Structures are given as structure tokens and as C-alpha cells.
Amino acid sequence: MNKKKLYFVQPNTMLGNSIYFPYAVGVLASYALQFEDINQSYELAGIIFKEDPQEQVFDCVKDPFVVGFSNYFWNYKYNLDTAKAIKERYPECTIVFGGHQVPRNTEFLEKYPFIDILIFGEGEIPFLNLLRALNSKLEMSAVCNIAYRDEQGEIVKTEDKFEGVDNYPSPYLTGIFDKLCNVPEGLEFNAQLETNRGCPYHCSFCDWCEYDIPMRRFPMERVKKDLEWISQHNISYCMCVDSNFGLFERDEEIAAFAVEQKNKTGYPDKFGACFAKDKTDRIFRINKLFNDVGMSKGVSLAFQSMSETVLENISRKNMNKDKLSEQLELYHKAGIPSYTELILGLPGETLESFSQGICELLERGQHDSINVFRCEVYPNSTLADPAYMKKFGIKTATNHLNINHCKLSNAIFAGGLEYIVETSTMSSEELVKATVFSACIQSVHCHGLLQCFAIYVHNTLGVSYYDFYHSFIEYFSQREGVIGDTVRRISSCIKNTDNGSTDISYINPVFGDITWPYEEAMLLDYIYKLDEFYNEAAEFLSGFGIDEKIFGELMTYQKQMIVVPGENNSECDFEYDWNGYFTSALSDKKAELVAEPSKIRLYAENVPEDWENYARQIIWYGRRNKKTIRKIEKI
């Protein structure tokens, strides 16, 4: 008997020469095909995992019975076009849409007649039962969490009921990904690892978890076998897709096993995760394990906002702010990179509260890395609820260009990302200013360009970080030159994307034919013309009244800190112990500048000589590891 052909489409975005496995549909397939009745009736005929042209899609898709589409904001328009084309060629084929971009209503069926069935929420059990219904083994109306058209063409939405799996066969181990279509030679895959499912929190901006859905931990044996498979197949990057890795005691064992695999084979080279925010000791131990073997991508300390009003608006509970300084000092002493995440545009945030908040992180000792994300609006989040949007005056725009570090053709979404451009407490103009301010903090401070001066005038002269960087932007916004031109260019780029138009001014061929986030674009422009940057900055810095002798030495020290393409070894003599001063300041201790002659060596290893590879290796790959700042040793 000929089996019915089952296809899946989950296009992911190419990042350089790498791409993630289509894990979501891999799980759907592996779960359904474990059952004998499904295995007897259906065959997995192929998986489209990247945005192939339609002629290549039809080289793979032949006589489909069911095609399932996994939808996210970056691929749903590609999926719509592909689904329509498949339906036109194979009108008897059943088109199924699911995933985060599908609203939990019948909107997609009403708008797109070529879609036959929608699946809501977790898809494993509904998809299994749907295949049984299509095989006449079950009534369609008995399948929960779907919407479909009945024989009269009327749209039917079935019972909304939680049906989540406690386990599923691994798509890695069952060979599901052997069915990937049109795999080019030399393509590198990134892996995803799911050790548990669910989230104990209910942040308004997130659609990860619904209320009253239990957390589920998947069997340790399967988790370890997945890691073994990833290691044995030389997968460089493994991203753990748990909502809060480190939440459970066993996560430490999982981390140790991943390290063990790297020690055996060299893979995975890096392990990324969203870490739990309230298991501080455990998270530290896990990250030390990773850091000791070079697997760490840095530890995230996600605050999202420093405003209590905003946190209340978004149903968010942060770690105690006072504990942040302790955590930062702990990671700093251990040499483990840390980064703090904020979301810009949350309801209740103002230009002042956001700008002061990001500077509060500096005050509390976060000088390594701060990541700021524009607030995105997902269809099934509380943030997308019309009543919620009205309450907080939320206005949005849809942007089709938001993927960084890839070619422009890949950076343009085959979908659309809806994000906040205005709220009742932050106008669109203020949001642009906040974005520029955050880019300045990330590039000029965290990457070291003026970090030494900012710390010195803060600790010694009592100037707040907010006043320092606010005056920096105000000063150069009115002046021509490298600094001012870049600030205005970035501002223009933000305005253009907020207006829905595509602006590619943050692509600079000097640094390769790829897109850059605003803060990295700003940093690259400044380092590319570093001497001009410091000449201009010196005029601004002279306004703080720093002693002339100290100013000269501090400027020399500051310049020598920055890693540039090529040779980065130098020796410097100073009449002040600058290294001791900044070591104390960055360790959150009282720093006093001592008039003591010192000689230091500054160095950085394996720095590319050309700008394109420098941008990739030092700015992109090295962002969370402070690769732009030279190491120092006393002579």
C-alpha cells in the first residue's frame, strides 16, 4: 500500500554559512511517526528548512497529502506564498498552519482560503490526532486546539484544551533530519536542545507560556543522547531552548555532560541558553563550567527594565537590584563574561526612566555588556491584546529587516516583525533618542572607547554616567565630524525603519556584505577612524576640568586599551598606577589614583589584520567576551 506523503516547511534564516535545524517540525514528525497506525499510513517525504525558490520546493514536494507549516515572524509570508503555490498545484493537498505567528482565532482561515487547518499552542498531540482524522480514524471535531472548514465550508474552532507532551522521540536520534531537502554542500547546522518545556513566569511581552500549564522535564537519558549526537556530528553551536536553564538542580548535570562531550570531541564549541534569574549560585557554577572550557556565550542577567512601574505593567518580577552588584562582582572575579538585557519601548517606560535605568546598570558595576532589544509584539502575547494596547497607548510598525550579521537578501524577513514605536509615555521621537542613547552606551562604554574616562570622571569627579553620556550625545549632535555624523546616520536609520521603509545605511562594505545592529555599526565606524574619534572626543572631555597631566596620561591609557586590526602589543610607562585604579573601579571597590610609576604591557592575540575579518571575529563573535579591550599585565 502506498503511504500518504507528509511534508513540513520551517524556513530558518541563514547566518553566514550556518542555519538552525528545523527543530519544531522535527519534533512533530518524530512524535507522530512513533505510533504504528501513523507509521503504517504516512511517510515523511521531506522538510523544507530554508527559503528555497518555488522551483526548488517543487523539486522536493511531489504528490503531497499533508504539508505542515511552522510559522514565525521571520518566515510566515514565505510560508503563505509557498502554501498558496502548493495548493494551486495540488488542490487535494491539506495545508496545515501552526506556530507562534498563528493567532489563537480563525483569522488565518478567513484571510487565506488555501489554508485548510490551523493548530493552536503545543502541536504534537493535535497534529497526531489530525493525521488520524484525515485517515478517517477520528472525527475532526474531536481534535482539540484546531480550526478547520467543514463540508459546508463553515469555519469550525474546536475545544481549546491544554494537551502537552511529557516526552517525545528525539528528531536527532530518529533520523528525522535525514529528510531535509536541498541541503547545499558545506552548510553548517546549529542545534537546539530542549530539556524541559514551560515557564513559571507570565511576562506580558512573551507568548512562551500560558497560565496553569505545568513545567515538564524531559528524560535525562534522552537529553544526554541528544548532546552525544550533537557532539558526534561536529555541531559547533548548541542553543538550549529552555525558558530558564538552571532552574532545576539537574541542569548542572546537563551542563557538566555537555562539557564532557566537548572534551571528548571538541563539540559543541559553544553552548547558549536563556538562564534562570533567581538561582544565582547554580547559574554561576554552570557558567563557570562552560567558561573554563571556552564554551560560554556569557551569562545573561535579564532585567528588561529598571523601572518598578514598568515591571508591574508587564507582570515581571526581577532579581533584587542590590544582588546585581554582588553577582557582577562574582562573575568579574571569575573572569566570566556577563551581559544584562533590557527591552526598549515597554509600557510605562519614559525616555528619562530608560536612560537613567541603563546608566543605573553602570552604577551597579555592569561595564562588560548591555544588550538592548526593541520591544516586539507577538500575536499571542498579552502585549498584543487590543485592550492592553489601548490602555498603554501602544502603536506599532512592521519591519521586514531585522536579522543582523547576514547578507541583506537573507536579512529581509519573509514575514514581518511588529514592534512598538510609541506608547502613551514615550513618543516616537523619544524612542529614537532612547535607541541612540542605548547604542552609545553599548558601543562607547561597554566596548571601551571612552570607558576609562567615564569611570574616572564618575569616581573621582562625581559626574554621573547619565550626565556624561547625555552630554556626549548633545555635544556631538550639533557638530560635524566622525562622532556627530555617525549619531545622525544611526538616528536617520532608526526613523526610516520605524516608518516601515528599509534603510541599509548600517551596511558598510568595508566590514563585509552583512547587516549590523546599530550599536555595532556605531562602534565599527568609530574604530575605523579611531584617531579622528579621539581627537574629537578630546575637545568634549576637556570640558570636565581634568588636571592636564592626568588628562594626558589617561588619554594615552584609554587609546591603548582598544583592539585594532593587526598587531596589538605595546608597552607604556606611566607616572600613575592606572591599571590598579581601574582594576579596583571595575571590581566595585573604592578606586584611588596613586602617583606611582608603572610600566604595563597591553596585548591582544589572534586579531585579524583586515577590517572584514576584524569586524566578524572581534566585534560580532567577541561582543560578549570584551574582545575590543586589550589585556594588561604589569612589567
Image: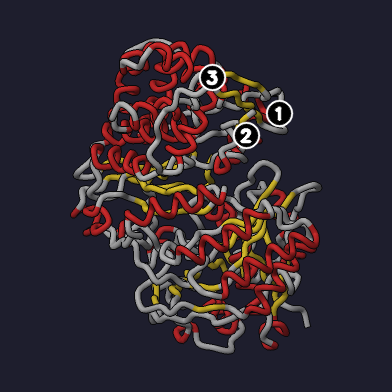
The amino acid pointed to by label 1 is: Pro
Name the residue that disc number 3 marks.
574
Pointer 1 or 2: first along the chain? 1
Front disc: 1 or 3: 3
- SS state under label 2: helix
Residue 187 percent coordinates (x, y):
75, 48
Left or right: 62 as drawn, with respect to 81: right
Please tell me which residue is depicted at 31% across the width and 18% down the height of the picture: 544
Please tell me which residue is depicted at 63% across the width and 57% down the height of the picture: 290
Categorize mark 2 by other alpha carbons within 10 Å: few (<14), some (14-19), many (20+).
many
The C terminus sits in image quarter: top right
Along the viewing direction, whichever of 545 and 574 lies nearer the viewer = 574
- SS state under label 1: loop
Name the residue that disc number 1 marks.
608
Q: Are marks 1 and 2 in contact (CB under 8 Å)?
A: yes
Pointer 3 or 2: first along the chain? 3
Residue 583 percent coordinates (x, y):
49, 37
Residue 446 percent coordinates (x, y):
47, 35
When asked about the image quadrant of residue 156, the answer is bottom left
Name the residue that disc number 2 marks.
618
